[in-house]
Structure formats: structure tokens, C-alpha cells
Image (tube, rainbow, N blue to C red):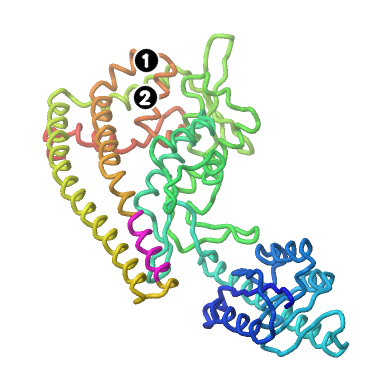
Amino acid sequence: MNKAVIYVRVSTKDQERGYSISSQLRLLRDYAGKTHLRAVKEFRETESAGKAGRTAFGQMVQLLRSDRSITEILVEKTDRLYRNFKDHVLIDDLGINIHFVKDSRVLGKDAKSADKFVNDIQTAQARFYSNNLSDEVKKGQRQKAREGKFPRGMPPLGYIRNGVSRAIEIDPDRAPLIKILFEYYAEGDKSLDQAHGVARKIGLTYRKSGRTLARSGVERLLKNVFYTGKFKWNGTVHQGDHPQIVTDSLFERVQETFQARSNGKTGAKSFVFGRLMRCSQCGHTVTAEIKKKRYIYYHCTGYGTNHKVEYIPENVLDEQFADFIGAVTIPDEFYNYLKTCLDSEIRNTRTTLETEKRQLELSSDKIQSDMKRTLQKNLDGKISDELLGKMQNDLQMKLTAVNYRLDNLSKVKSEEFDRAAKTIELSHQAETLYFKANPEQKRKLIKSTLSNCNLSGRTLCVTYRKPFDLFAEGIKFDNWRRE
């Protein structure tokens, strides 16, 4: 009785058309029994046959080379085995018999030239079909890209696909964390290692696995134009129809930081206000230099621009920054009122979290009970192994999601309240801290409260970070509680 191996394969498109691994296996096993061949190994593949170097295919070839007692390959038909000439030649060189069961044809060393010719034609047809399918797919992807639709299936971290409309939407859990990471690195004096540390600290993880990002993953994220509402496809940047997480200007500042660090130009942080401002006329970074070995002046770098470059003494900028910081310094009464509100919110949230926690625990228990019931149904012969595997996989994914929410339920809220408490404390003492601070402490205070600092001539214009923008507005009014 000759030894044989069975090779079965489906691609995604085949599965959509109703083909399956199980139907091929039944056919080939029945054939082996009828022809008195002993199948010693079965290889199952779920990749395209047009792709050389398939996993199971390679394992089969390796076995056939090492065990010369195996003389037969059983396969459904030509395009199940190969759709490229490289694999065709590879199998041919093994010098064994190939049984194309559906075609009722055996191809081997002693096969007729007519049979070999037919097989070559079928391989060429299969290769043409594979190449043509690839061309059609690429054509469709190019058209989708021109229409602003991201051609790939899975969008980057921070986005999810709507299960019904298939539109790309913002992941509400991760998008805010990604924006924090962009803003942190855009400050210009932070290393990629520090950004990686921040990503871990704020809990930025992959949605399915729950794993934290590696350093290289943080770098790819910060360089991905997708977060601005665009995407790159075949070397061209397209305007996408998905929402943006970061603004174009924030993304550009991050890329400039990468460029500056690669050029070794990170020494500006030695000046108090170095790399904190941009020129309102041309958008270039405002830099600093020392005059007469003692006076520090700030000015636009002015690369490629024709506008007049003004030099502003450091003490003039210092006074303006102090005024902006002073504008968000909340009075004692306001401070005590906010602390009372926060304490009340913490108590209410704890009650809500306890309720949500109980609901999640009930969901977890129900999913585990469902998993036990499906297993029992399989043992009772009511459902097949294949259906059991699918149902258990779906339930496990739901259980993982519920457990992830349980694990992070209190953590996220605790971090939010901690940030809120620190923000209130900082705003209460902001002005005092600024005047007492050393240069590095001043930089940190400015970065914590202000963003988009622009110089228009000798006048500093800023945007307050949230929630300092609310403080700045509310403090102006007598009835600041309402404001």
C-alpha cells in the first residue's frame, strides 16, 4: 500500500463561494480508501495559491523531501495545489505522483505528454485567474482610495469599524490617549523613550490583545498621517472620509520634532522659552540667542520668509507669560468651591461604578455559563466540533472584552479624578509658582496650561489648554460659579 499525503486549501474568496476544507477532505479520504492509498499526513492551507511560500505547502514539500517512501499527493484539482509556476516546478522536481481527484487524472514521471500539457495549461489558467483577481482587487482599492475610503480592512489604533455601515469611527477609549501622546511629543524636548513611557503610563493598549505599545509602535503611531483624517496609499496621501484625532498643525509639530531630534537640534530647551512659540506670520519656530554674552533675545527663525524679523528681550516675554498664567489663578473661594464639587462627583461616581461593576460581573458569569452549555451540547452530540469552536471563540471574545472593562473600570476614573485634583491645585497656585519657579519649572508650568503660543511682533498670543480655558473665562466674571 503506497503512502500518500493529502493537501487541501481554501482562500477567503473560496469560502465566500461556499467551498470548505471539510468537503475537500471527505473527497480525498474516500479516494484514498478506494485506491488503497495510506494517507500518512494531511496538510490544510487557508492562503492564496498564487502566493509562493505558503506555510502548509512548504511543510508538505519538506516532508516529501525527507521521507522518500511517500510517493503520492492527493489534491482536489490543479488550482488547489498551485497557481504559480515556481510551486509547479518545485512539486515536479520531487518526482512523485499527483492525484487530481476531481479531474480523474494522475500526473507523475510516467504520465503521458498530453496529460502534462493539459496540466500546464490548467496551471497557466489558474495563474491568469489569480493575477487577474489581484489586478481587479488593486483597481478596486485605488478607486476606494480616490473616493477617500481606506482600502485596508483594519484601521490603525484609535479607530474602529462600524459593524453595520463599515465606516471608520473614532475609538472613544483610545483616541483621547493618542491625542495626549501627540501633544506630549510635540513639546519638542521629549525623547521617544519618554513618549513610550507616557503611552504605558496612560494605558494606551491594543484593542483586541490589550498589550501595550512597543517603542517602535509609538514611533509608527506618531508618524502616521491617518490621525489627521488622511491616509497614505501606494505612496500617495489621500483625504479620507474618517474623522481626525489630531489637527494638521499638531501632526506637523510632531514631525518637526522628529526631524529636529534626528539633526541633533534639541539644544533650544536650555532657554526658558525655547521651542515654546511660533511666528504668527510664517509659522516657523521662535528661537533664542544671546547678545553681548548676557542678553537673551527671541526671534523667528525666518527660513525662506521675507517678513521683518523682530528681536524680543526675554524679560518682555517673561512678563507676558506671567500675565497669562495669572489669568488662570483661581481665588481661594473658587478653589474651595471646586474642591467641594469634585468631592461630590467622586462620591456619585463611586456609586455608579459599583452598579456598573455588578452588571459586568453578571455579564461575565452569564458568558461563562453559556460556554459551559455549548460544551455540554457538543458532548451530547447536539452541535458539531466546528460549530462549537465558532461559538466558543465568539463567547471568549465577549468575555475578554467584559473582563477588560472590569479591570480598567475604576482605574480610568481614578486617573481622571487625580488629574482633576492636580489641575485644581495647580490653578490655585499657578501665579505664585511661576514667580518662584526656576527656568525648567517655568517651562513645565507653561506647557501644562498653555498651547499654540504665537508671537505677533512683540505681542504674545496663546490658547489655554482645557480646563484652564474655562478658568480663564470664568474668573473674569463676578458670578464665576455660574460662568
Task: Tell me the residue that label 1 is attached to.
Answer: 437
The residue located at (31%, 17%) in the rendering is 433
Front residue of 406 and 34 = 34
- Assess whether residue 423 is covered by the magenta stretch: no
Count the labels in the image: 2
Front residue of 348 and 237 = 348
The residue located at (29%, 20%) in the rendering is 431
The residue located at (44%, 61%) in the rendering is 242
Residues at discs 1 and 2 in contact (Cβ within 8 Å): yes
- Assess whether residue 396 is covered by the magenta stretch: yes
> x%, y% of residue 206?
44, 49
Front residue of 246 and 478 = 246
> x%, y% of residue 98?
75, 79
From this view, report whether residue 307 is shown above or below residue 396. above
| Residue 337 horizontal side relative to residue 249, left or right | left
> Which SS does the magenta portion mostly show?
helix
Task: Tell me the residue that label 2 is attached to.
Answer: 445
The residue located at (77%, 70%) in the rendering is 87
Q: Amino acid at mark 2?
A: Leu
Res. 14 image quadrant: bottom right
Front residue of 333 and 73 = 73
Q: Secondary structure at mark 2?
A: helix
Quarter of the figure with the N terminus = bottom right
* Magenta extent: 388-400
Q: Secondary structure at mark 1?
A: loop
Query: Which sits earlier in the primary sequence, circle 1 or circle 2?
Result: 1
| Disc 2 residue crowd, few under 14, some 14–19, many 20+, Cα 10 Å | some
Q: Amino acid at mark 1?
A: Ala
Q: Give how far apart the Cα atoms at labels 1 and 2 are.
A: 9 Å
Rendered image: mark on residue 208: none
Res. 38 image quadrant: bottom right
> x%, y% of residue 303?
62, 35
